[in-house]
Image: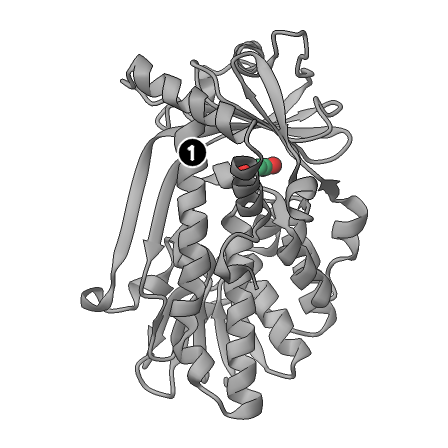
Amino acid sequence: MRTQVGIIGAGPAGLLLSHLLHLRGIESVVLESRTREQIESTIRAGVLEQGTMDLLTEAGVGARMKAEGALHHGFELAFEGKRRRIDLTGLTGHSITVYAQHEVIKDLVAARVAADGALRFGVSETSLHGIDTDKPSIRYRHEGEACELQCDFVIGCDGSQGVSRASIPQALRKDYERVYPFGWFGILCEGPPSSDELIYARHDRGFALISTRSPNVQRMYFQCDPKDSVENWSDDRIWAELHARVDSHDGQKIVDGKIFQKNIVGMRSFVSATMQHGRLFLAGDAAHIVPPTGAKGMNLAVADVRVLTQALDAFYVDSRADLLERYTETALKRIWRAEHFSYWMTSMMHRVEGASPFEQQLQVAELEYVTTSRSAATAMAENYVGVAGAQAS
Ligand code: PHB
């Protein structure tokens, strides 16, 4: 089989790229190792920057996000028993939408299916061939048959454990990584929101985050040992921990509810500074990982796709290869800004085992500063909404 662009991975990056290319008359095939049910139900984060919403809307998949997502104009920072608001819209003119990643995936899959897009689920034994020639191909197994997809370009959107990044010769790769000594315990629970806006809390017991999914379903997290097990945490123990970390001295309390999902995720920062090799280009988690504190993961994947779509469009429509050649350089500017911001938020908000009382007071001093200085608050807000730095244009 032959196509123009072979895409590995049906996450937000792979699906959105496939759909944007389709709207420009460029053909693609998406290969995914999991089933449709699996990708549509995996629980991930859910904050969309304005630029992400704009691109989803441009792709024609923004209707449900607008109807069901919650538009937020600020968030709260909780520390030392008080809460202070960061006025995102007042400081930057932009807002964010809380809409779960698997809902974005459902909307994109529906759009690809409605457009008769080629989307293969449950593929295995995927391997890349000839990526340093102008005739690359992808071999894989699908429904028991050995298949080969010949294409002009291969786009690796298959996450950090996928085959794409691993197909770039090790000697040509430059990776940067930091692993954090803590994880996030996430819950989904029934009940009303505890607050109109997200609450990021710093406490001597550790970080906590109050987020939302709908008027009746809430998403909350608290810092934990990444090796801990969900079985060690009864519902009562979870609520006691969340109350201890988030409730304010003036009596503002989070609202308990029936917990129906628990999971633990590790935290890592990672950048592959080699995002392209020959006819292979990496996008999203295949090239970079951020800790979830800055809410940047899906937004970075979508930003890569924006750059790639323009570059592939220039190649096919204007026979220009220069944008493709500059893909890594262009994408890395935004990626490193988001890496720094996510690292900074993480460092300011989390309890570090063995941190001295002096270091703990520095975290509090920094929170005092970003919540009282308009310029410090603006710096935080423009990073959070995704318009910081030269890459914003
Ligand atoms: C979420 O709602 O899952 C969420 C929100 C904000 C974050 C991370 C996760 O920073």
The residue carrying mark 1 is 346
* Ligand 1 positioned in quadrant: top right
Q: Is residue 370 above or below residue 194?
A: below
Question: Which residue lies most toward the left here?
Answer: 171
Q: Is residue 229 visible?
A: no
Q: Quadrant of residue 55?
A: bottom right
- Could you tell whether 383 is left or right of 343 in the image? right
Q: Quadrant of residue 276?
A: bottom left
Percent coordinates x, y for residue 53 in the rendering: 68, 56
Color scheme of the displayed model: one colour
SS for tag 1? Answer: helix
Question: Which residue lies most toward the bottom here?
Answer: 319
Amino acid type of disc 1?
Thr
| Front-most of residues 242 and 34 | 242
Mark 1 Cβ and ligand 1 under 8 Å apart? no
> Where's the C terminus, which quadrant?
bottom right
Q: Is residue 85 visible?
A: yes
Q: Is residue 100 above or below residue 1?
A: above
Q: Is residue 153 above or below residue 85?
A: below
Which residue is at a point 41% across and 23% down the rendered structure image?
363
- Could you tell whether 94 is left or right of 125 in the image? right
Q: Is residue 323 above or below residue 18?
A: below
- Could you tell whether 83 is left or right of 124 in the image? right
Q: How many marks do you count on the picture? A: 1
Disc 1: CA contacts within 10 A as few (<14), some (14-19) or many (>=20): some
Question: Which residue lies most toward the right here?
Answer: 67
| Front-most of residues 223 and 364 | 364
